[in-house]
Every structure is written in structure tokens, then in C-alpha cells.
Image (tube, grey):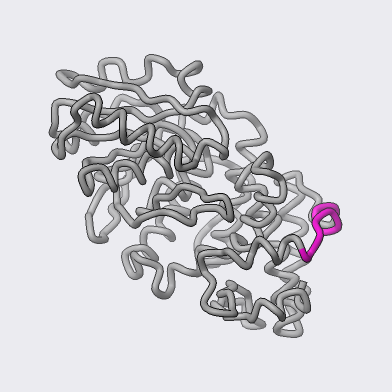
């Protein structure tokens, strides 16, 4: 078992373990009300219908299940969750547990953050990507027609419980998706031992230590936290062009390739970084050249125009300079095509 503390507007512990034996000790104290709503998806309910049995003693437990998939992270499901909490007479003292991957985590946390202006929240991520990234840091969101995560809040959970045994039933494609997100951390902080060779407690801890340190310094993404968006601007556009059928982390990994190509032209260098990236992509099982040729650049830019990082006629891109450091660079929309 490993544990680390994230210090932000709400201080909380992140527990990394193998199994659910520590859940009562680590999480139950933060669910003070008599009711708990477990937000999950249709796939998880089939595989783990009894996961929380005996873990929530003396609580009235309700389940709200959304259809598995990115398309469920929408306004309709959000309103459905909110109305369900009202129907079951949830109060400010009651709580929400998100039990799922990034989609469940985002919409469930957004619901918890806005119901009665905020109720208790425990995150139990079930995908590798959610374990190493989206369950930690307090970002919540739903998608709008024009783009991903355009509606959301910053709302820290009361605790995060990472049960590595849940990875045993994760499809291979989702494991690769998690590796795509882990790839980002190699560029964010080269001092940490981030390897794509072995998925274990140490790897997840190292990734989250990087993220926890950055969030503690810049919770609301006014500065350094923007670096965690490396690869995401293009990644989100690739995701939308695929109608969200391609896993998020794989899209991020492809987006990192675009960001490196962009950096290479912007800084007139960076070929070494790109060659290293190509070798790492082999471990994820994605051919960047194939992906790069597949997507129409004008369509990518049309989606990027609606990215939440837009400021006037420019978009903030995270690029890597010739000193191997990530930089936030505002680039005019009309100039993007020149660099990709």
C-alpha cells in the first residue's frame, strides 16, 4: 500500500492498494451522511455488482448507472443524476462515490460539485487512465456539442481510493489508453521514474506524485498546471473526429505526436524528442504516421477553435523547447496549420 496527500483547497489522501480491504478505514469517515449515491456505468455494474457490499455499513446506498462510453458524459445524463439525487432526498451531508473510468469520474464529480453547491465525494477509479490522472486534481466536466469538457468545475474530492485489482478485468485497449496518459508524465517531469514497461503500484504513485505537486502549486490551472495539458489540445480534436470511439489516452498519445511535430517546427529542432516518442508509441501499439495521415488538418483546426484554452484569436499550446522543457505558447488560430 502507498499513500500520498494532496494539499489544495481541500486536503485529501490518495490510497493506492491491491484490494478493497482498506476502503472502510480510508474513505468511510468522509461519508458522514446517511445516504450514498454510487455513480457507475453499465459495464462496471455487470462485472462488479457487489463491489460496495459491506463497504458502506449503516448507509442507504443508491446506484445510478449510465451507459458506458464518452457519449454519456452529456447534459442529459447530468440532469438525470441531479434529479435522481433530488428524488432520493439527498441532503448536503450525503455523498457521492464515482466508480468507473474517466467518463464516470468526470460527470459524477461534476454532479457532486453542483448538487446543493457541493456534497461529499469519494473517487474510486477503475481504469488505468483514471487512476493515474483524471481521478486526482479536482477537474470535473461534461461535454457540449462543440467540444470536450466545455462545462465543468474545479472540485476536489474528499478522498481517492485506487484498487489495483480492478485492472485485472480492464480490456487491453483501456490499458493502452492509460499508457497513453502516462506517456505525458515522461515529458512533464523527466526526473521521475516513469516507465511504460510495467504497470504497478510504484508507477501509479510516481505519476500521481507529479500531479499532486503541480496541483498543490496551481490548483485552478493559472500557470504550471497547464503543462499537464501536453498532447491534449490535439488529442481532444482527434477524439471528436473519431466520434469518441477511440480511447481518450490513445488520442492523447497521438496528440503528443502532433505537439512534438508542432514543437519541432516552432523551435526549429526537437527531432530527437520525436524519435524517442515513436519508440515509446510502439509499446502502446499505435502507429503515429498512420494516424497523422488519417486526419484532415483543417477539420482538426476547426475543432481546436472551440478548445477551452482559447484566448481571443489564439490558443495556448503546450510545446517542448530545445532545452527539453515544456512551455505554454499562445499561437494564433490562423497560424496553427503552418506548424502541423
Quarter where residue 263 is shown: bottom right
Chief SS of the magenta region: helix
Residue 228 percent coordinates (x, y) = 50, 63
In the figure, is residue 175 to the left or right of 160?
Answer: right
In the figure, is residue 105 to the left or right of 57?
Answer: right
Name above or below for residue 228 compared with residue 252: below
Q: Nearer the viewer, residue 47 or 210?
A: 47
Name above or below for residue 26 compared with residue 313: above
Quarter where residue 271 is shown: bottom right
The verdict on residue 295 being magenta is yes
Q: In which quadrant of the rendered image does the N terminus lie?
A: top left
In the figure, is residue 326 to the left or right of 265?
Answer: left
Residue under the point 58% across and 59% down:
184
Instruction: Tell me if residue 67 can be seen.
Output: yes
In the figure, is residue 318 to the left or right of 124?
Answer: right
Residue 109 percent coordinates (x, y) = 35, 43
Residue 243 percent coordinates (x, y) = 68, 43
Residue under the point 67% across and 59% down:
255
Bounds of the magenta segment = 290-298
Q: Nearer the viewer, residue 325 or 80?
A: 80
Amino acid at each position: 500500500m502507498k499513500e500520498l496527500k494532496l494539499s489544495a483547497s481541500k486536503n485529501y489522501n490518495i490510497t493506492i492498494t491491491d484490494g478493497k480491504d482498506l476502503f472502510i478505514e480510508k474513505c468511510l469517515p468522509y461519508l458522514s451522511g446517511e445516504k450514498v449515491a454510487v455513480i457507475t456505468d453499465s459495464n462496471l455494474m455487470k462485472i462488479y455488482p457487489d463491489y460496495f457490499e459491506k463497504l458502506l455499513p449503516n448507509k442507504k446506498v443508491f446506484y445510478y448507472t449510465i451507459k458506458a462510453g464518452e457519449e454519456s458524459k452529456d447534459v442529459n445524463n447530468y440532469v438525470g443524476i441531479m434529479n435522481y439525487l433530488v428524488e432520493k432526498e439527498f441532503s448536503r451531508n450525503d455523498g457521492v462515490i464515482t466508480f468507473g473510468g474517466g467518463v464516470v469520474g468526470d460527470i459524477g464529480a461534476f454532479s457532486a460539485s453542483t448538487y446543493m453547491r457541493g456534497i461529499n465525494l469519494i473517487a474510486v477509479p477503475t481504469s488505468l487512465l483514471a487512476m493515474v490522472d483524471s481521478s486526482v486534481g479536482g477537474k470535473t466536466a461534461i461535454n457540449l456539442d462543440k467540444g470536450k469538457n466545455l462545462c465543468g468545475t474545479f472540485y476536489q474530492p474528499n478522498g481517492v481510493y485506487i484498487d489495483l485489482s480492478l485492472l485485472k478485468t480492464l480490456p487491453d485497449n483501456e490499458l493502452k489508453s492509460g499508457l497513453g496518459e502516462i506517456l505525458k508524465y515522461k515529458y512533464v517531469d523527466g526526473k521521475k521514474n516513469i516507465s511504460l514497461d510495467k504497470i504497478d503500484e510504484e508507477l501509479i504513485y510516481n505519476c500521481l506524485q507529479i500531479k499532486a505537486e503541480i496541483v498543490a502549486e496551481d490548483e485552478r490551472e493559472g500557470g504550471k498546471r497547464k503543462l499537464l495539458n501536453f498532447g491534449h489540445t490535439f488529442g481532444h480534436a482527434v477524439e471528436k473526429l473519431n466520434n469518441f470511439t477511440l480511447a481518450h489516452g490513445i488520442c492523447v498519445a497521438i496528440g503528443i505526436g502532433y505537439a512534438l511535430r508542432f514543437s519541432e517546427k516552432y523551435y526549429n529542432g526537437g527531432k530527437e524528442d520525436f524519435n524517442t516518442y515513436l519508440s515509446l508509441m510502439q509499446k502502446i501499439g499505435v502507429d503515429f504516421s498512420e494516424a497523422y495521415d488519417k486526419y484532415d488538418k483543417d477539420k482538426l483546426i476547426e475543432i481546436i477553435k472551440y478548445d477551452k484554452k482559447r484566448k481571443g484569436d489564439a490558443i495556448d499550446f503546450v510545446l517542448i523547447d530545445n532545452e527539453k522543457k515544456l512551455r505554454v505558447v499562445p499561437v494564433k488560430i490562423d497560424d496553427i496549420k503552418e506548424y502541423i
